[in-house]
Image (tube, rainbow, N blue to C red):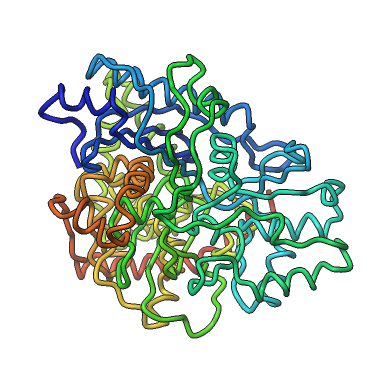
């Protein structure tokens, strides 16, 4: 992927004629917009807006006002980039795609009014519902899935339940407001309710099981009537309405009519952005959360609470290891050292501080010198934690050095993920290669190398690592025009990644052994984390 083109006049013409695809992704900390040309490997312009979730009444949430103001800021930033590069103003696009953090709970009444504040994937208050659904369905139903949130609201007899007429995800909500259509991509849908990959739709048997389960608690509820329509990649999912165009671009320059691809979750766009949609491939996405997606060759032998069964944007089955806590605690430590440098009279930008500290981690001992770092700012189901307690723990005979501390912090980002990946190892799931993307992989050869050691598998990083899901959903939007001729996997291989520069790192035996020793201590040390949750 490249971020500019050698013929600005051609790019300008493509923009003015609407021969482009726009991808928008709502991440945990940034809303990003990415514009690609007819060749989806060429990024013409980008825009972004920073935002943060709030912890209100013990619920992690974003206000819907922030959704729209943030989207408008990101889009305006992209338009400014287009003007700066090409002296042009986009008025339409060949296609648009919307992606966002998966899961969570947005419930609306018959007047399309939000009934309760948006409950994001980060909330872990659905334990009773998750356990009951997992038992009844015979599948692991994670705490963050939409059906777990709905069921917990029913169990808690929340006042809004009788008024629910529609439940969706953040991507589904934004798409609905832009197009008027209540639809969702199959990958995002697989984080709402279990999907039958044979039909690329909600599992009809389990829909019936659920309706029977809540018949006494919520009389008349038919869960299928509350969920958005499921569409696989390549299907047109509506067109930008006049109201949607005004929401996206209040200036009035953007015209209605552009087609939209099915809205997808960040897991699906991560798979696309790393070309990890075929069996024996997988990807790791690291941001505020961290998760791994592994495309399966065959069904798993039994349910595992560490693994979610979801799908690719084309509907193929995937095992997902999702961890609520990713690189936020690591970033906080980097911020501490950045401030130290500033106080010492050395002014370094954030990227330079990250690079220095990441390079230092390579000089750390393979097992991080006996140090443990836990990045749990929020609850972490795989680790058995209802709430987060970030900690650095060491024994008196451990070696506290900057190199060991930074290696422990990077290991800590991968710690809970590795617990889940060990389950896939025991299932006999084999990987040819893991693709990685996210900001922590921007420093070449550091997080990538340590992740290879943690997973004991080759890890690849491509040119798309810093663009991530916004580019992934732009690619899915561009696929609308080609889906009749080819499937998604072939489109990615032949049109998108055929000439991609990809750097692959094989695991070092020393790193594999060192991380294994770290993980053994990490698992044992979770007792200290649990005690901290109880005590504080």
- Residue at image location 60% in from the left, 75% down from the top: 139
In-front residue for pair 486/452: 486
- Residue 466 point in image, percent of width and height: 29, 41
Find residue 252 and report its horizontal and vertical position in percent. 48, 16
Q: Is residue 51 left or right of residue 440?
A: right
- Looking at the image, is 437 positioned above or below residue 276? above
Q: Above or below — where is 533 with respect to 76?
A: below
Compare residues 420 and 495 and report the one nearer the observer.
495
**Position of residue 168 measured from the top left corner of the image (x, y, whole percent):** 63, 49
Most distant residue in the bottom direction = 301
Residue, x 19% and y 50% (percent of image)?
Answer: 445
Question: Quadrant of residue 14 in the image?
Answer: top left
Residue furthest out toward the left: 6
Q: Is residue 296 left or right of residue 199?
A: left
Image quadrant containing the N terminus: top left
- Residue 448 position within the rendered picture, expressed as x and y whole percent measured from the top left: 25, 54
Visible in this render: residue 359?
A: no
Of 236 and 225, which appears nearest the observer? 236
The residue lying toward the viewer, choosing from 356 and 167, is 167
333 over 312 or under it: above or below: above
Residue at the image point whose x is 22% and y is 19% from the top: 85
């Amino acid at each position: 992927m490249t971020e500019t083109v050698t013929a600005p006049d051609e790019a300008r013409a493509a923009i003015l004629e609407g021969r482009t695809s726009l991808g928008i992704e709502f991440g945990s900390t940034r809303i990003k917009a990415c514009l690609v040309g007819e060749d989806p490997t060429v990024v013409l312009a980008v825009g972004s807006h920073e935002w943060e979730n709030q912890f209100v009444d013990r619920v992690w949430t974003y206000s819907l006002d922030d959704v729209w103001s943030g989207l408008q800021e990101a889009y305006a930033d992209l338009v400014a980039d287009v003007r700066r590069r090409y002296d042009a103003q986009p008025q339409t696009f060949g296609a648009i795609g919307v992606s966002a953090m998966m899961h969570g709970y947005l419930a609306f009444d018959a007047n399309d009014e939000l009934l309760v504040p948006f409950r994001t994937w980060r909330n872990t208050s659905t334990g009773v519902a998750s356990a009951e659904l997992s038992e009844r369905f015979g599948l692991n139903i994670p705490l963050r899935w939409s059906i777990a949130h709905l069921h917990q609201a029913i169990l808690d007899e929340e006042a809004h339940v009788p008024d629910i007429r529609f439940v969706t995800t953040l991507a589904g909500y934004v798409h609905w407001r832009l197009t008027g259509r209540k639809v969702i991509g199959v990958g995002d849908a697989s984080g709402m309710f279990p999907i039958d990959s044979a039909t690329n739709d909600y599992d009809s048997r389990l829909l019936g099981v659920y309706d029977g389960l809540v018949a006494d608690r919520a009389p008349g509820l038919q869960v299928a009537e509350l969920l958005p329509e499921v569409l696989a990649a390549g299907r047109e999912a509506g067109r930008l309405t006049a109201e949607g165009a005004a929401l996206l671009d209040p200036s009035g320059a953007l015209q209605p009519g552009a087609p939209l691809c099915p809205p997808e979750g960040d897991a699906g766009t991560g798979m696309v952005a790393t070309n990890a949609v075929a069996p024996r491939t997988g990807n790791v996405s690291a941001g505020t959360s961290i998760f791994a997606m592994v495309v399966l060759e065959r069904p798993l032998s039994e349910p595992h609470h560490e693994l979610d069964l979801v799908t690719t944007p084309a509907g193929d089955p995937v095992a997902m290891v999702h961890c609520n806590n990713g690189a936020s605690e690591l970033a906080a430590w980097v911020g501490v050292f950045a401030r130290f440098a500033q106080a010492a009279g050395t002014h370094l930008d954030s990227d330079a501080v990250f690079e220095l500290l990441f390079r230092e981690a390579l000089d750390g001992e393979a097992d991080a010198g006996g140090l443990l770092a836990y990045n749990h700012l929020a609850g972490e189901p795989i680790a058995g934690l209802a709430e987060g307690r970030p900690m650095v723990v060491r024994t008196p005979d451990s070696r506290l050095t900057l190199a060991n501390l930074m290696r422990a912090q990077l290991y800590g980002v991968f710690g809970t993920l590795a617990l889940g990946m060990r389950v896939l190892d025991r299932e006999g799931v084999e990987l040819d290669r893991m693709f990685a993307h996210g900001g922590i992989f921007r420093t070449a050869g550091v997080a990538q190398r340590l992740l290879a050691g943690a997973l004991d598998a080759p890890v690849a990083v491509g040119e798309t690592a810093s663009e991530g899901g916004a580019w992934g959903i732009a690619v899915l939007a561009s696929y609308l025009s080609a889906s009749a001729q080819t499937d998604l996997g072939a489109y990615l291989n032949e049109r998108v990644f055929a000439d991609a520069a990809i750097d692959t790192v094989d695991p070092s035996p020393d790193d594999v052994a060192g991380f294994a020793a770290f993980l053994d201590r990490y698992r044992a040390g979770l007792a200290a984390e649990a005690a901290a949750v109880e005590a504080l």
